[in-house]
Amino acid sequence: MFSIENLIGAPDIQKGFFVMLVGVTGVFIVLIIFFILIRFLGWLFPVKNDEDKESNS
C-alpha cells in the first residue's frame, strides 16, 4: 500500500505527480458533491409551472 514515507525521498517528478493526482481527485470529488447538492435542492424545491397562469390571464 502507499505510504507517505516513500514520497519523502522520491524525485521531484514523482512528488509532482502525487500532488497533481491528489488535486485532480479533489476537484472531481467537489464537483460530484456540488452536482448532488444541486439535484437534491432541485428535488426539495421543484420549479413551479407558470405557463398555465400566463395563458389564463
Image (cartoon, rainbow, N blue to C red):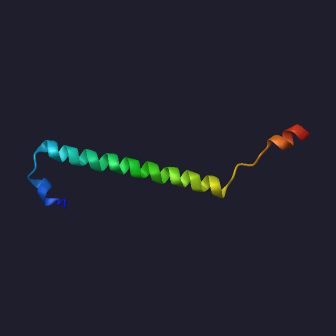
Q: Position of residue 22 (x, y in %)?
A: 29, 50
The mark tally for this picture is 0
Q: Position of residue 52 (x, y in %)?
A: 84, 43
Which residue is most to the front? 1
Q: Position of residue 12 (x, y in %)?
A: 13, 43
Q: Position of residue 25 (x, y in %)?
A: 34, 49
In this rendering, would 44 be left or right of 24?
A: right
Residue name at image x 17 percent, y 59 percent: 4
Which residue is most to the right? 57
Q: Quadrant of the C terminus?
A: top right
Residue name at image x 70 percent, y 49 percent: 47
In this rendering, would 9 be left or right of 1?
A: left
Q: Is residue 55 above or below residue 44?
A: above
Q: Quadrant of the N terminus?
A: bottom left
Residue name at image x 75 percent, y 49 percent: 48
Residue name at image x 54 percent, y 54 percent: 37
In this rendering, would 45 be left or right of 29?
A: right
> Which quadrant would residue 55 be assigned to in this image?
top right
Q: Is residue 15 above or below residue 2?
A: above
> Which quadrant would residue 11 be assigned to in this image?
top left
